[in-house]
Amino acid sequence: MRDFDLIVYGATGFTGRLVAEYLVQAYPADGPRWAMAGRSAAKLAEVRDLVGAPADTPLVVADASHPASVRTMAERARVVLTTVGPYQLHGNDLVAACAAAGTGYVDLCGEPAWMRHMIDAHQDSAKASGARIVFSCGFDSIPFDLGVLSLQECAVARHGVPAPRVKGRVRKMQGGFSGGTAASLKATLMAAARHPSIVALLTNPFALTPGFSGPHQPMGLLPEYDGTIGAWVAPFIMAPINTKNVHRTNFLLGQAYGKDFVYDEMMVAGLGDVGRAAAEAITKLNPLASDKGPKPGEGPSKDERDNGFYDLLFVGLMPDGSRIDCVVTGDRDPGYGSTSKMVAETALCLLETEGEGGIWTPGALLGATLRHRLQDKAGLTFRVG
């Protein structure tokens, strides 16, 4: 028997603290045997008191720069939830340790090149040990992964076949991306500059489906008028990671969406000439060019998190000309408030379900079980019509 059901690694960081706080508030008495982990015992104790955790909440010292401490941590837990990114800089040893020890793993990774490297390096060992490694368990990419899954379940139920074409459209969003997301994007771009082979992974929609390459996919790099929804749309910064995860879910489910499946994501800019101007402005905007956003470890106030939200539309176009819509909403800002709840509930869902070892997406491994849990616990809604 392991010492803990769950270890929250990175609990002294901003998002990790929100995860710990959520566990304290949502599961005060009937939750898992869990511990908080990070580099400093003193800082962990400070955060434990700050979030109102019981004084006897275990504290585990682990440091990504000391692989032995990471291995020991992985061996003590049934599941490790890590918010310590960028993962390409701090995650290699933890994934390897979990894969070897048969330990479940969830993270908030939006770094597709690193994810592919981890798939290549550890898929076989995770499968052999029974470790279930689940990347991208926050805003990137659960609402998109499960949104498409929900739509396709409806398509098969109604028509007997999946929708070969699905459009993901971000209709509304209040609240920005996390400082960790920005740091991960910057680290990815720096890695690509050093290793040009990474560029091929970043630009390949099927980078996370080893051995399979589907049809041409829309790139979504330019503003365009989307006749399906009657509005102008613009590039969405998280599309390069979300679309890859959606294609990996299809791949892991044995091409349940079809081998000819086409998917893209864009932001809704507006109607008419105003919408066109807004789409062009969004396209020119570089969210990484400014240093005004939160740094890793920083984030918005509680009021800003609580007042955030998002509204996503998925449109499935069927071969007979009919259409299926799925709307996904979240009740907190995407980068922090909603993400911290999603990753926590994914870890708990992993604890309470069984499945084969390997490197998974949330949709392929946990699917409808996770969707129901997120609706019951984490403020998400999924409406298909």
Image (tube, helix red, strand yellow):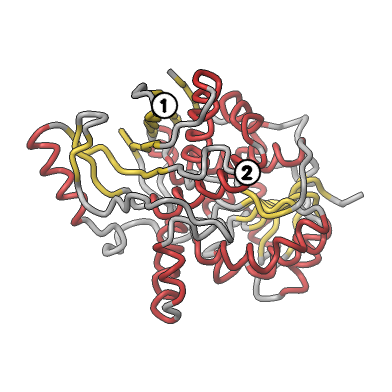
Image point 70% across, 37% down: which residue? 349
For residue 285, side relative to residue 111 (left or right): left
Residue 347, quarter of the rendered image: top right
Q: Badge 1 is on which residue?
A: 327
For residue 176, side relative to residue 279 (left or right): right
Q: In the displayed structure, would residue 368 be above or below residue 385?
A: below
Q: In the displayed structure, would residue 329 be above or below residue 182?
A: above
In front: mark 2 or mark 1? 2
What label sits on residue 206 in the rendered view? none
Residue 306 image point, x, y percent:
43, 33
Residue 296 image point, x, y percent:
46, 61
Mark 2 neighbour density, 10 Å: few (under 14) some (14–19) many (20 or more):
few
Q: In the displayed structure, would residue 379 be above or below residue 82?
A: above
Q: Secondary structure at mark 2?
A: loop
Q: Badge 2 is on which residue?
A: 254
The three-letter amino acid code for the residue at tag 1 is: Val
* Marked residue nearer the N-terminal end (2 or 1): 2
Image point 72% across, 41% down: which residue? 350
The three-letter amino acid code for the residue at tag 2 is: Gly
Image point 64% across, 50% down: which residue? 360
Q: CA distance from mark 2 to mark 1?
A: 25 Å
Residue 168, quarter of the rendered image: top left
Depth check: give the residue in front, 224 or 210.
Answer: 210
Image point 74% across, 62% down: which residue? 124
Question: Which residue is situated farthest in the front direction here?
Answer: 320
Answer whether residue 311 is visible to the viewer in this image.
no
